[in-house]
Image (cartoon, helix red, strand yellow):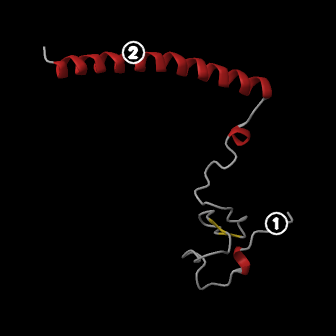
């Protein structure tokens, strides 16, 4: 067998061992994370506070809501079609409620 084929076989064996060890260690890490979450009563928001945010910075709280679709808009940037060119007063979110 050529050295190249021997090395490829060794690589395949190592890849299989790596996958096996990774699976075992990952299961241990998941169990440890679950224990910590349970012990400290952590929520998703505690662990991933920026979850769902795709913007680099904070875009602010929504100030307008479309009553038909519940879509919101902060008042920054290009207005969405549901509010564009319309009186914005009826769409304002009452923040004091």
Q: Where is residue 7 in the image (x, y as percent from the top left)?
A: 24, 20
Side of 71 relative to 90 (left or right):
left
Side of 79 relative to 5 (left or right):
right
Is 45 drawn above or below residue 14 in the view shown?
A: below
Quarter of the N terminus within the rendering: top left
Residue shown at the point (13%, 18%) measured from the top left:
2
Which quarter of the figure has residue 33?
top right
Q: Which of 96 and 76 is in front in this view?
A: 76
Q: Which of 49 and 65 is in front in this view?
A: 49
Asked if the residue at tag 1 contacts the one at tag 2, i.e. Cβ–Cβ closer than 8 Å, the answer is no
Side of 3 relative to 32 (left or right):
left
Residue shown at the point (48%, 21%) measured from the top left:
22
Farthest left residue?
1
Is 78 drawn above or below residue 24 in the view shown?
A: below
Checking the image for residue 95, the label placed there is 1
Farthest right residue?
96
Closer to the N terminus: mark 2 or mark 1? 2
Quarter of the C terminus within the rendering: bottom right
């Amino acid at each position: 067998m050529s050295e190249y084929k021997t090395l490829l076989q060794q690589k395949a064996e190592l890849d299989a061992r790596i996958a096996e060890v990774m699976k075992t260690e990952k299961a241990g890490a998941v169990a440890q994370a679950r224990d910590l979450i349970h012990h400290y009563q952590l929520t998703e928001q505690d662990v991933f506070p920026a979850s769902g945010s795709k913007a680099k910075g904070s875009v602010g709280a929504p100030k307008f809501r479309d009553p038909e679709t519940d879509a919101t808009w902060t008042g920054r940037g290009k207005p969405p079609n549901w509010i564009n060119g319309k009186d914005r007063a009826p769409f304002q979110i009452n923040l004091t409620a």
